[in-house]
Image (cartoon, rainbow, N blue to C red):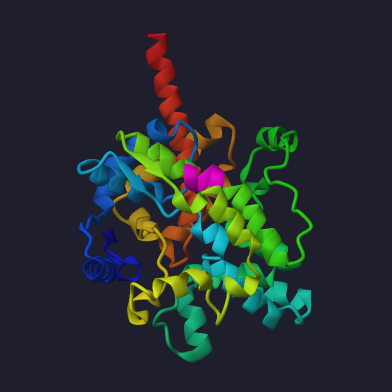
Amino acid sequence: MASGDPYLDESAVAADVAQRLGTNHTTLRVTGEDALDLVPRLPEVYDEPFADASQIPTLLISRLAREHVKVCLTGDGGDEIFYGYNRHVKLAQIWNRVSSVPLSTRKRVGRILERASARTYAWALCGNVTGVRADHVRKLGLVLQSDDLESAYVALATFWPDPVPVLTANARDAISHASPWRAPLPMLPELLDRLLWLETTTSLPDDMLVKVDRAAMSVGLETRVPLLDARVVEFAWSLDTSLKIRGGKGKWILRELRKKYIPESIGSARKQGFSIPLDQWLRGPLKDWAEALLDPAKIDQEGFLDSRQIAATWKSHIVSDANHHGRLWAVLMFESWLDANRRSNIRDYE
């Protein structure tokens, strides 16, 4: 899978790995126009306001795979049980450096970084903007404003760290009566393990597995998840953290196994994730579609979201290099789902 953003393009490395392993390989290049063709189908495929933007490449690659096979294996679960996400490793390192700074100072600096552009930040720091991304700067700002490591982790793992201001009074009341979304953290000896448990019991089953299963089944493709075999999960949780995180990198034990098949020069390539340049697409091919869904009059009439908060976020994303694609995508998927259900109800009534 490749996109127009070189920062997210792993196609060359993937082709090299496939050649070394002797496997069949196909490259699928995804554009903003592909996404625009697909977004009207998302409410139908997911049947709920599902806001993980990697659903787009997942749907496209499922469609491609179904042209050749009926069942395939996925790698879901490996990051959750072996500390594979960058935030697993980097967050603790950053927190150890900044936690001694007074909270009041951290909050002031954090608010500046959360709102500053990546270009301004990089120039002030070292006069160099190469490789600095707005989302990295924003995430650092969120970490600095957090009271403790757990709240910093939650801030990084959510689109809207404080969703209350985005909701109308009626919607807030409905949420206040809902049960907590996350499972109680068990008293594991290490905080990172407790956070890993949180991810394994919430985002893994409610996001990752749902995303893949519904995308695949929408085209008649079945998937299997070998890394979530009960024996593999039990083994992973029995390992000491030092066998999962070492040398500033996660999934250490899997990396050691990989060396038997893939040279270190390839296997140590920067982790990209299954991402798309959604921030750019929202300013380009998806802009008109997004603006129609985010129309303030429409949002006010529905009565769920605060149109002023949404409009401010949209304007900030469009006119600067601030990256709010995660927050906006959550709203867009909710609005798209509302519209699809409204059209369906009208057809049923007719």
Q: Can residue 202 be seen in the rendering of this structure? A: yes
| 197 left or right of 87 in image | right
Farthest-out residue, bottom:
126
Image quarter of residue 156: bottom right
Q: Can residue 154 be seen in the rendering of this structure? A: no
Q: Which of 70 and 302 is in front in this view?
A: 70
Q: Identify the image quadrant of the N terminus.
A: bottom left
| 194 left or right of 314 in image | right
Q: Which residue is drawn at 45% across and 73% down?
A: 255
Residue 296 position, x and y percent, is: 49, 40
Residues rendered magenta in the picture? 204-209
Q: Residue at x 39, y 34 (%)?
A: 45
Q: In this view, does 5 lie above or below 24?
A: below
| 30 left or right of 143 in image | left
Q: Which residue is drawn at 39% across and 51% down?
A: 74
| 246 left or right of 151 in image | left
